[in-house]
Image (cartoon, grey):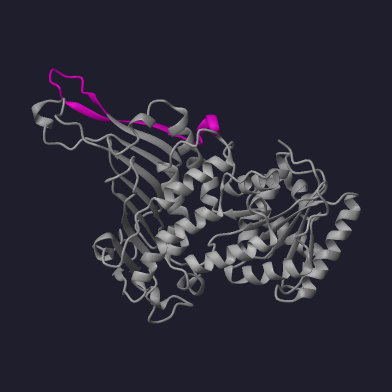
């Protein structure tokens, strides 16, 4: 599917880390796949006083770091230097007047009023400023009903708690309709996350046993070896629960546990995700000591930008429950942290142990469960642990693994980057992989009670390279 109408992407934070690492390489990959419109332009906006040629050099370098093939170097060069740039301060309304002037010039060259996509690739503290100035300048008003839609892409975190998320949503609602707002959680665009829904709702094998009747527990982990890596000042005001708990972890949980949306459309899928998030049982302040662990790695307070008496968590582990017929009584362990022994993101579904064991007497005491693992990163895969009879004169069994892996000869190079998917879906108007207002508020509602309970609680210190706090 190719985007046909002329489109201009206005990137606020054009020289930032996100833009250089993710956006420009993703746009170029879409360009190579010939799905971008023939008339396409990136308009970069940031504080630095550089020319459009210098911006082209920055874009070229960003893309080249991702593509080592010399055969496409000329394509990288042509794509990079066809983009444009303006210098401006987000707080100054004059910046938005300059944007309007440049957009008018671009549309004149196109001979058509182009689609306008505003990408806020900036720290959350700038969201309100940029949105208010977009409103003042009138830049978000479409040309007409026939020409040029306007949309906005906003990175997570969407707010810092329930109230701030609500306020930000109110401001967005004054500028855009819900169908124009694309709130990014790039985990939703990962192939393995999308494949959880296909695995569950396309196959007839698993959905009939996907409930508390057959499932004992579910674990979701997002673990990192890296520490805060020079992002101390940003991370210290955030913490692990806001950074990945409110979004990535809960979205994985929703994919694993939501009801069948029946149809493959964004409205149904987002509605079912919302229903699930609203069914999460809040963890009260009294329950926190039994249901949640707050940790901080040793040496975190000495990181650049971190306050010396910081109580910010770099690790959390929660036990959650869902109040509905399907999942009543099933414990969900949600865990994430930095500076740990390994890097991996996965969801594990543990089925109840078969009793009595159909096995030799020597195996009667062994715990043997079927486990389905969705490995999201690294080494993306879906695996199923099962048991077979060992070739012998007795009824001994062996544990085996049935595994589908991404990559390899069959799928090498096919799997798109999450940001490619995000950008493409936004341009074609598909909101399936973007969180709705209701989803955002439902997830904050669950997380808020934990944040409130942890406000004055000291984190448990754990060693870097460990598995987290011993508790």
Q: Magenta region: which residues?
A: 387-411
Image check: 226 left or right of 433? left
Is residue 377 positioned above or below 312 on the image?
above
Quadrant where the C terminus sits is: bottom left
Locate residue 229, reporting x and y percent. 48, 67
The vertical placement of 364 against 334, above or below, is: above
Q: Is residue 160 or residue 382 the one in the foreground?
A: 160
Q: How far across and down, in percent of the image, does residue 115 sit?
A: 78, 51
The answer to whether one can see residue 50 in this image is: no
* Quadrant hosting residue 336: bottom left
Which residue is at the far bottom? Answer: 308
The x and y percentages for residue 10 are 74, 59
Residue 469: x and y in percent read 28, 64
Q: Nearer the viewer, residue 288 or 194?
A: 288
**Depicted 405 relative to depicted 94: above or below:** above
- Which residue of the protein is positioned furthest toward the left in this rendering? 361
Residue 7 in view, yes or no:
yes
Looking at the image, residue 110 sits to the left or right of residue 35; the answer is right
Asked if residue 398 is among those painted magenta in the image, a careful observer would answer yes
The N terminus lies in which quarter of the figure?
Answer: top right
Q: Residue furthest top?
A: 393
Q: Residue at x 78, y 68 (%)?
A: 137
Q: Nearer the viewer, residue 345 or 446?
A: 446
Along the horizontal axis of the image, is 369 left or right of 347?
Answer: left
- Residue at image point 57% right, 68% down: 167
> Which residue is pictured at 38% across the width and 45% down the height?
347
The magenta stretch spans residue 326: no
């Amino acid at each position: 599917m190719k985007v046909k109408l002329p489109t201009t992407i206005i990137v606020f934070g054009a020289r930032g880390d996100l833009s250089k690492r993710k956006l420009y390489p993703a746009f170029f990959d879409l360009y190579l796949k010939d799905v971008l419109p023939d008339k396409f332009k990136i308009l970069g906006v940031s504080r630095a006083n550089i020319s459009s040629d210098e911006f082209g050099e920055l874009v070229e370098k960003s893309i080249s770091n991702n593509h080592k093939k010399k055969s496409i170097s000329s394509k990288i060069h042509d794509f990079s230097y066809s983009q444009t740039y303006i210098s401006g301060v987000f707080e100054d309304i004059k910046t938005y007047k300059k944007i309007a002037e440049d957009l008018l010039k671009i549309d004149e060259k196109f001979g058509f009023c182009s689609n306008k996509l505003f990408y806020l690739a900036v720290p959350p503290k700038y969201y309100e400023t940029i949105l208010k100035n977009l409103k003042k300048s009138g830049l978000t008003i479409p040309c007409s009903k026939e020409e040029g839609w306007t949309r906005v892409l906003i990175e997570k975190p969407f707010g810092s708690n329930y109230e701030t998320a609500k306020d930000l949503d109110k401001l967005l609602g004054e500028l855009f309709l819900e169908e124009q707002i694309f709130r990014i959680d790039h985990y939703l665009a990962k192939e393995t996350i999308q494949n959880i829904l296909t695995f569950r709702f396309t196959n007839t094998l698993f959905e009939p046993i996907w409930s508390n009747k057959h499932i004992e527990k579910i674990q979701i982990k997002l673990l990192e070896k890296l520490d805060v890596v020079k992002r101390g000042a940003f991370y210290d005001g955030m913490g692990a629960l806001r950074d990945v708990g409110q979004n990535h972890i809960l979205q994985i949980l929703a994919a694993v546990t939501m009801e069948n949306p029946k149809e493959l459309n964004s409205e149904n899928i987002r509605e079912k995700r919302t229903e699930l998030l609203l069914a999460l049982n809040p963890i009260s302040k009294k329950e926190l000591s039994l249901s949640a662990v707050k940790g901080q790695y040793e040496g975190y307070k000495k990181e650049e930008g971190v306050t010396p008496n910081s109580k910010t968590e770099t690790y959390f582990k929660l036990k959650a429950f869902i109040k509905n017929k399907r999942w009543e009584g099933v414990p969900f362990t949600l865990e994430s942290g930095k500076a740990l022994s390994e890097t991996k993101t996965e969801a594990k579904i543990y089925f109840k142990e078969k009793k009595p064991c159909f096995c030799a007497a020597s195996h009667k005491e062994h715990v043997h469960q079927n486990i389905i693992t969705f490995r999201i990163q690294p080494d993306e895969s879906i695996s199923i642990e099962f048991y077979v009879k060992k070739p012998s004169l007795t009824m001994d069994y062996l544990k085996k693994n049935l595994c589908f892996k991404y990559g390899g000869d069959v799928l090498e190079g096919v799997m798109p980057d999450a940001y490619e998917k995000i950008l493409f879906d936004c341009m074609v108007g598909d909101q399936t992989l973007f969180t709705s207002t209701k989803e955002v508020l439902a997830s904050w509602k669950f997380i808020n009670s934990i944040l409130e309970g942890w406000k004055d609680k000291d984190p448990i210190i754990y060693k870097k390279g460990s598995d987290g706090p011993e508790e």
